Amino acid sequence: MAVSRGILLLLLALPALAQVPTPVEDLRVHDMPGDDGTSLLLSWKKMPYDGQGGTFYVVEGGEEGKELAQLIQVDSSSAWSEDIKLPFWLWSRDKERHAFEVKSVGGANVEKDKAYQFRVTTLFPGGKSASQVLPGKAEENWFDSRQLNNFVILVFFSTVVLLFINRAKTNPNMFLRKIAGLDAIDEAIGRATEMGRPLYYMTGLYGMDAIQTIASTVILGQVARRVAEYDTQLRVPHRDPIVFSVCQEVVKEAYVKAGRPDAYKDDYNFFLTQDQFSFTAAVDGMMVRERPAAIFYMGYFLAESLLLTEVGATTGAIQVAGTDVASQLPFFVTTCDYTLIGEELYAASAYLSREPVLVGTLRGQDVGKLLTLTALAASTVLAFFGVDWILDIVRDWS
């Protein structure tokens, strides 16, 4: 009878024994890879009681030799390893482990090379259980390994560009994708020559510190060379004195390369005013009076773009525009015959000059874009068919 009573008491005690808390297993302290030594990572194994009501994890930490203080309390169904924002080559997105990033301890930010200690306590409705205390130290990394993807991409695409530059030196007629606006340059210059009317070229609003203006001056050099060969009248109005000086030298050099230095005139380039709309009004007046046969707008343009191109359209001129200012592209597309959109402005210099370095760079960029689009298309197909790991790769390499 006494034995039966003992068995009954044991059976009644089993639910209570099931609630006895057990400490977390395989607790680890990691240095945050690729950072400046201001954070640490804690991780521990997924436990059988994860997700049970009223079960929480309390992360505690403090400086070595001092009392531990609570850093955070999280539900046992949260704080997973896959939530840590680190690329796959530095951190395993193990769905069977919890993880927490420690950025501050005891109200102070984590400091590099300073000794800390940590513990994870499990809270149950019927009690709690603390893990062993583990030491940890944050270290400063001289190389940000989180950006390894950018370094690899840089090396890869740089190699592709260098290979095409070397190839362009032996094959200057390397194929480049067609750009309609650039194919129309000879047509526009030829029309101005036949009609005996001038050609206008504008470099935009910005100075020589803008990449758009630099690209515009390169295109101007190629246009001026053809103008010199055809003996066409050229007008290049300016609102920036530095750009004015640079363009003078560019046009002069173009005439020399065309073998017609005697045909060059200093007044091909002229300075008007630095005020945006005074400049616009002056150019509009000149276009109405001289009625140019071709007008080029290459560079950075703002509100004056439509004011210029509308007047230019009334003269019957062929208008070719190029800019990477998205807000002005609709106006250029509407009022001009041809428009170079975005990066086509920068491709124009290679397209016109056929310089091996520029041609090779442009071709290498096109190949890089093709490879990128191919990778994205293949990733989309794999993701559609449930290949989940491809999403991690795309996220980490994008």
Image: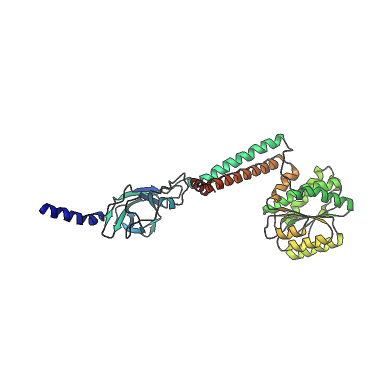
Q: From the viewer's side, name the closer residue of 26 and 212.
A: 26
Identify the image quadrant of residue 169: top right
Q: Is residue 128 left or right of residue 110?
A: left
Percent across and percent down for residue 324 are 68, 55
Q: Is residue 33 left or right of residue 128?
A: right
User: In this rendering, is residue 86 above or below 166?
Assistant: below
Q: Which quadrant is the N terminus positioned in?
A: bottom left
Percent across and percent down for residue 114 are 37, 51
Q: Is residue 180 left or right of residue 69?
A: right
User: In this rendering, is residue 372 above or below 11?
Assistant: above
Residue 170 in view: yes
Identify the image quadrant of residue 205: bottom right
Percent across and percent down for residue 193 are 87, 50
Q: From the viewer's side, name the closer residue of 308 and 184.
A: 184
Percent across and percent down for residue 394 are 53, 47
Identify the image quadrant of residue 290: bottom right
Q: How many marks?
A: 0
Residue 249 in view: no
In this view, the residue farthest toward the left is 1
Q: From the viewer's side, name the closer residue of 122 and 355.
A: 122
Colour mapping = rainbow
